[in-house]
């Protein structure tokens, strides 16, 4: 009750003495200079791969990448403008790759991260621990970390998992849009009822390595079981609140209520279709129209594209506001607690962005909105990065303890699980 009264007084104070947006953003930037903003998910490596086949010299990140023929959300001036102190660069690979191709491709993605960091040494520095993040941030550089998006990247091999960690990966999302052989995704028909025996072994080995278990993209059953199995805190690197927008990629309240016991963090994402029910329904209608046009005009992609553009002009996509993203933060704070909230924009992984969050320069605007709603400076420091730093330190300490007690797991999937028929899926994000 005391917390609610304090929040009410803070909101009343803002209403009586409103600050200009630029003043709030300036205050937000001051906070981000004190506590590093750690964004949980940015798909820049894949954006570079798509545009240049991994030739990083063909994209100048010191320039305004909005001016490219194929515009981007991310460049160094805008990272600076946005107050970003640390970034998990996602090393996503498509889910339809053969296992050996997935391993090769994820290694190539990791290589892109290391080469980008080396190309801009005055801006970026590789980070592997919470202490690294704080040290690099104190020097005015952006700490660069690696997150593997999708357990399909390890090709059912704990040896590959270990080598990805050795190459710098500090979290892994257990699935992407399709199931793995050992874990169910949120956006596919369940085939394992959560985690298989091998899936549990993957989680335990990640704990031993000190690799954060990322539950974005997984089914509620996988979420619940991974939270139970994991000895370390878990994260959601780019998810929002299901109660605010019921997309299957978001986190339901019953899972949010478990985060306190496991000390996890949900990093609110900026994907419009995840943040807005109206956009989710619009996307479903667009998919239906695409299917209809394909059945009517199977012979001509050009005709289908023209007719789809006409449909979109007649049915414009709803726009998401910063306020709606802040609503997700509010809900996570209410259900899970302020110490379990973070930020995971998913820039370069979507097309439609909320107004004011069109690129990595937009974080201060979101934090200004939270200040306007009565969040304290300490609240913002926690959301920006201190919550994730706490989680990382706990995972690192546990890994040190586990490594002193047990050897790397030599479990093979064929020893513990029945063979499974892979499911299919396509989309990114």
Image (cartoon, helix red, strand yellow):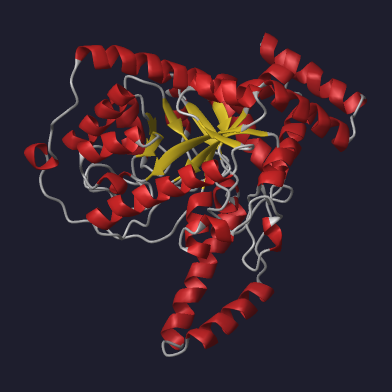
User: In the picture shown, does residue 272 fall above or below 218?
Assistant: below
In the displayed orientation, state which residue is furthest to the left: 415
* 394 with respect to 401 (left or right): right
In-front residue for pair 299/137: 137
- Percent coordinates x, y for residue 170 in the rendering: 41, 32
Name the residue: 56% across, 57% down.
Answer: 57
* 243 with respect to 366 (left or right): left
Name the residue: 19% across, 17% down.
Answer: 406
User: In the picture shown, does residue 180 fall above or below 376?
Assistant: below
Name the residue: 43% across, 39% down.
Answer: 147
In-front residue for pair 16/38: 38
The answer to which quarter of the image holds residue 27 is top right
- Percent coordinates x, y for residue 132 in the rendering: 52, 23
- Percent coordinates x, y for residue 7 in the rendering: 73, 18
* 343 with respect to 127 (left or right): right
Q: How many marks?
A: 0
In-front residue for pair 235/103: 103
In-front residue for pair 71/305: 71
In the displayed orientation, state which residue is furthest to the top: 2
Q: Is residue 373 visible?
A: no
- Percent coordinates x, y for residue 255 in the rendering: 42, 30
The answer to which quarter of the image holds residue 1 is top right
In the displayed orientation, state which residue is furthest to the bottom: 299
User: In the picture shown, does residue 232 fall above or below 64?
Assistant: above
Name the residue: 47% across, 89% down.
Answer: 300
* 260 with respect to 24 (left or right): left
Q: Is residue 379 visible?
A: yes
User: In the picture shown, does residue 279 fall above or below 231?
Assistant: below
């Amino acid at each position: 009750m005391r917390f609610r009264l304090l929040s009410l007084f803070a909101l009343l104070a803002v209403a009586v003495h409103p600050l200009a947006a630029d003043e709030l953003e300036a205050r937000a930037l001051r906070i981000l200079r004190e506590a590093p903003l750690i964004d949980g998910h940015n798909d820049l490596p894949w954006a570079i791969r798509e545009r240049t086949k991994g030739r990083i010299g063909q994209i100048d990140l010191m320039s305004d990448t909005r001016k490219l023929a194929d515009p981007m959300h991310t460049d160094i001036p805008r990272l600076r403008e946005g107050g970003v102190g640390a970034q998990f660069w996602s090393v996503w690979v498509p889910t339809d790759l053969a296992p050996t191709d997935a391993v090769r491709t994820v290694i190539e993605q990791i290589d892109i991260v290391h080469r980008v960091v080396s190309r801009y040494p005055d801006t970026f520095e590789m980070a592997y621990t919470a202490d690294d993040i704080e040290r690099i941030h104190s020097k005015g550089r952006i700490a660069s970390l690696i997150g593997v998006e999708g357990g399909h990247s390890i090709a059912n091999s704990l040896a590959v998992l270990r080598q990805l960690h050795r190459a710098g990966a500090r979290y892994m999302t257990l699935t992407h849009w399709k199931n793995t052989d050992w874990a169910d995704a949120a956006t596919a028909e369940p085939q394992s009822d959560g985690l298989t025996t091998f899936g549990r072994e993957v989680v335990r080995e990640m704990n031993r390595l000190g690799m954060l278990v990322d539950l974005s993209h997984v089914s509620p059953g996988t979420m619940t079981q991974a939270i139970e199995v994991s000895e370390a805190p878990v994260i959601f690197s780019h998810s929002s609140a299901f109660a605010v927008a019921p997309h299957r990629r978001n986190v339901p309240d019953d899972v949010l209520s478990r985060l306190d016991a496991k000390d996890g963090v949900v990093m609110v994402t900026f994907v419009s279709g995840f943040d807005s029910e109206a956009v989710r329904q619009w996307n479903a209608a667009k998919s239906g129209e695409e299917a209809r046009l394909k059945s009517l005009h199977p012979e001509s992609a050009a005709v289908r594209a023209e007719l789809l553009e006409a449909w979109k002009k007649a049915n414009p996509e709803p726009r998401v506001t910063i306020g709606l993203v802040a609503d997700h933060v509010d809900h996570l704070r209410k259900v899970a607690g302020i110490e379990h909230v973070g930020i995971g924009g998913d820039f370069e992984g979507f097309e439609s962005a909320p107004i004011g969050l069109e690129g990595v320069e937009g974080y201060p605007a979101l934090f200004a909105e939270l200040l306007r709603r009565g969040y304290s400076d300490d609240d913002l420091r926690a959301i920006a990065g201190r919550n994730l730093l706490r989680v990382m330190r706990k995972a690192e300490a546990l890994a040190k303890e586990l490594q002193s007690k047990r050897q790397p797991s030599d479990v093979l999937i064929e020893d513990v699980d029945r063979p499974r028929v892979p499911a299919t899926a396509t989309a990114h994000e």
